[in-house]
Image: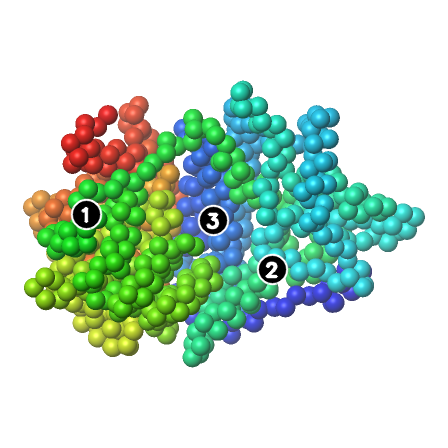
């Protein structure tokens, strides 16, 4: 039966890659110098999970971290494991950065995921659920429901679920149904009464409704009782399959491959992306998670139809999808959440366009989100430019932006009023392709000059230019260069830095960059800006070598999201041997090994994970200055990754103002002193969480929020409480 179904219902497969792009020549690398990238990333997700299991965090925020861990792992599997599995199909003997074959790497990944998922499930079952109960929040099992609650769920099923559910039986006349990515399903083994033949059916759990149903809400006593939609459906299957014998039920969830990278850049890039998105929907299944007792008959069928192997099967730990618990975050229980934070609005950026731009002309301005308002600074910069009749042109890059982007609205308004508006929209931003295509088309309809980047490169830079005619009739260029996306929603969750400047040389080089992006002008000479793929990598290596000349007086501090770049890592090892002190603040994965005797004795790697996602990229070189805060600072869009330095268009700008250098140095000192959110990487790639030095346990995030409030209070003449 299973074989017949499989032959008739095998889904469309995405075409296999025939080549492996950018594969490292491991034979030229000392693999003992590096940690495996994928295991290093899983170590990062372990630090996210630690936030969920850390009882010092508010209870509902711990639930939020469970969801983040879950969605992180989903994306990792779709992107990274999908890529590894495709490479294994081409050549299983290919090696990763640390010398493991891809088959060995995949085995380590699987073991690590099982280890972390067990930790998550055990913590959820023994600690988090118990703490929820202590706070009158119950996630009930079916056997725990009262008669009144059973009656309520029955009515809920009939009113809200029965009309939208679609039971799909599988037999020779009913092919195996398509199962969408990350969807939760019930696999059902059933048969007709009096017959021996076992049949398979599938019911998809609808995700358009909250996955946990509130049964009881006593607002006076704050008592909340929930049951899962999946449990409700499982216990009403007799209404979906009347007259049938239900022999077994097995909830499962599949993951499809999202590893896609365009090999052929044709003339119609939009069409190419749309075709790729269609392919992704039907991409091969690469993971199946199941919950509860494993039914071997159904598992054998699913493996055959979905073309899965035993190593692709994972037993879910407690829940299939912890993001389903997000309904708990809406409960009106402020004591169980972080204290709300509203980014402060700097008082020096006026609502009058002339005053606004004059302030930038007077001095460079550094903004730090989400401590300072993204809306009142970066969004205002583009909005003011769109409304100011003295502004002649606006140019900007969009890598990721929101569903209701104020940037797009401002650019459309500017084009409608006759301004020259150019917007580079990167269509290959993973999982944001559809949204970016939509906004690109909306911009084009309004008369904005839309370009899609440079063939063979992703445009990842976060830059905007405004050209304005001043009162003396001269033209002045204003620029914003940042570390994060022009995305209003994530700006409240991600920590990012940005600079507003009128510096003539920097703005001139940024104009050259936009000419390259729109006109393919191959000018690779940048004296101030670090621009990938032109001079960035060479400049960074040169600055590391320059620091080596100072020996033990040398100091390098680099903050970024991830690090794997081999040449820069090897140069840092050389610098460490020369006595240079190196501190890397890396939120995500780091392939470089710190603290290895004779190799990296002077290299320290720190990771900070907390309520905000550390996203800013900041680079510091002491360069022989007596005072540390007088050294060189750079900020921008690039991590020290192969892709950022070689395959993307990135911009990093120097911080020229001493006032802004002081702010950057204070930020660095604050994060280095953190003993609440900081973890120290060990030589073997593992991490140890720092222990508090005092009872206050104040984190970087909390300190910077407090300082932001004090700064605004001081400027406005209000005494901070």
The residue to which callout 3 is attached is 72
Label 2 CA crowd tier, 10 Å (few <14, some 14–19, many 20+): many
Q: Where residue 139 appears, x then y in whole percent?
A: 60, 31
The residue to which callout 1 is attached is 350
Most extreme residue toward the top is 221
Most extreme residue toward the right is 194
Q: Closer to the camera: disc 1 or disc 3?
A: 1
Label 3 CA crowd tier, 10 Å (few <14, some 14–19, many 20+): some
Q: Where residue 124 appears, x then y in whole percent?
A: 54, 34
* Marks 1 and 3 in Cβ contact (< 8 Å): no
Marks 1 and 3, the one that precedes in the sequence: 3
Gap between marks 3 and 2 measured at Cα:
18 Å
Residue drawn at x 14%, y 59% as measured from the top left: 502
Residue drawn at x 44%, y 35% as measured from the top left: 61
- Helix, strand or loop for disc 3: helix
Q: Quadrant of residue 450?
A: bottom left
Q: Where residue 378 appears, x then y in whole percent?
A: 27, 52
Residue drawn at x 21%, y 62% as measured from the top left: 389
Q: Nearer the viewer, residue 492 or 635?
A: 492
Q: Quadrant of residue 452?
A: bottom left
The residue to which callout 2 is attached is 285
The quadrant in which the C terminus is found is top left
Q: Is residue 473 above or below residue 117?
A: below
Residue 554 shows in the view:
no
Q: Where residue 170 appears, x then y in whole percent?
A: 77, 58
Q: Is residue 61 above or below residue 41?
A: above
Residue 467 shows in the view:
yes
Q: Nearer the viewer, residue 8 or 436?
A: 436
- Helix, strand or loop for disc 2: strand
């Amino acid at each position: 039966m299973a074989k017949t179904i499989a032959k008739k219902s095998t889904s469309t497969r995405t075409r296999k890659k025939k080549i492996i792009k950018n594969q490292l020549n491991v034979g030229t690398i000392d693999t003992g110098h590096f940690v495996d990238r994928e295991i290093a990333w899983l170590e990062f997700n372990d630090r996210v999970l630690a936030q969920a299991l850390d009882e010092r965090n508010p209870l509902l925020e711990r639930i939020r971290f469970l969801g983040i861990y879950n969605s992180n792992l989903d994306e990792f599997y779709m992107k990274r494991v999908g890529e590894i599995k495709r490479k294994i199909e081409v050549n299983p003997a290919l090696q990763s950065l640390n010398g493991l074959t891809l088959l060995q790497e995949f085995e380590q990944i699987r073991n690590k995921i099982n280890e972390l998922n067990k930790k998550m499930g055990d913590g959820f079952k023994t600690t988090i659920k118990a703490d929820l109960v202590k706070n009158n929040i119950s996630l009930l099992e079916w056997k725990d429901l009262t008669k009144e609650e059973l009656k309520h769920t029955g009515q809920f099923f009939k009113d809200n679920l029965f009309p939208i559910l679609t039971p799909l039986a599988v037999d020779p006349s009913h092919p195996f149904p398509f199962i969408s990515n990350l969807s939760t399903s019930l696999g059902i083994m059933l048969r007709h009464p009096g017959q021996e033949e076992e049949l398979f059916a599938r019911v998809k759990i609808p995700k358009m409704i909250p996955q946990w149903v509130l049964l009881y809400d006593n607002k006076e006593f704050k008592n909340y009782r929930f049951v899962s939609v999946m449990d409700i459906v499982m216990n009403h299957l007799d209404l979906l399959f009347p007259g049938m014998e239900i022999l077994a039920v097995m909830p499962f969830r599949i993951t499809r491959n999202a590893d896609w990278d365009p090999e052929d850049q044709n003339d119609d890039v939009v069409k190419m992306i749309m075709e790729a998105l269609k392919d992704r929907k039907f991409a091969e299944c690469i993971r199946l998670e199941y919950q509860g007792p494993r039914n071997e008959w159904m598992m054998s069928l699913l493996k055959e139809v979905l073309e899965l192997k035993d190593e692709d099967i994972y037993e879910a730990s407690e829940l299939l999808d912890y993001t389903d618990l997000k309904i708990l975050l809406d409960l009106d229980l402020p004591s169980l959440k972080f204290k709300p934070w509203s980014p402060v609005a700097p008082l020096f950026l006026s609502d009058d366009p002339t005053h606004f731009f004059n302030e930038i002309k007077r001095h460079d301005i550094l903004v730090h989100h989400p401590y300072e308002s993204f809306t009142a600074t970066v969004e205002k910069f583009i909005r003011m430019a769109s409304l100011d009749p003295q502004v002649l042109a606006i140019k900007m890059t969009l890598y990721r932006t929101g569903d209701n982007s104020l940037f797009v609205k401002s650019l459309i308004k500017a084009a409608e009023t006759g301004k020259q508006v150019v917007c580079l929209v990167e269509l290959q931003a993973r999982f944001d392709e559809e949204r970016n295509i939509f906004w690109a088309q909306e911009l084009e309809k309004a008369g904005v000059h839309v370009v899609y980047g440079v063939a063979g490169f992703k445009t990842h830079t976060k830059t905007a230019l405004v050209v304005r005619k001043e009162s003396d009739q001269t033209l002045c260029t204003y620029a914003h260069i940042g570390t994060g996306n022009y995305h209003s929603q994530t700006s409240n969750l991600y920590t990012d830095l940005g600079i507003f400047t009128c510096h003539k040389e920097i703005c001139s080089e940024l104009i050259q960059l936009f000419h390259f992006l729109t006109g393919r002008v191959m000018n690779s000479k940048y004296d101030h800006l670090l621009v990938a793929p032109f001079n960035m990598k060479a400049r960074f290596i040169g600055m590391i070598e320059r620091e080596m000349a100072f020996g033990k007086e040398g100091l390098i501090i680099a903050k970024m999201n991830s690090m794997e770049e081999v040449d820069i890592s090897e140069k840092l090892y050389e610098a460490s041997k020369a006595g240079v002190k190196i501190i890397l603040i890396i939120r995500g994965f780091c392939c470089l090994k710190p603290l290895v005797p004779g190799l990296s004795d002077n290299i320290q790697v720190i990771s900070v994970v907390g309520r905000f996602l550390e996203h800013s990229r900041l680079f510091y070189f002491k360069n022989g200055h007596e005072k540390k805060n007088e050294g060189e600072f750079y900020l921008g869009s690039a991590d020290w990754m192969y892709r950022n330095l070689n395959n993307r268009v990135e911009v990093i700008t120097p911080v020229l103002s001493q006032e802004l250098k002081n702010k950057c140095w204070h930020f660095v000192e604050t994060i280095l002193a953190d003993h609440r959110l900081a973890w120290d990487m060990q030589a073997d790639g593992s991490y140890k969480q720092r222990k508090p030095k005092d009872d206050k346990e104040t984190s970087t995030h909390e300190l910077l929020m407090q300082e932001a409030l004090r700064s605004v209070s001081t400027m406005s003449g209000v005494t901070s409480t």
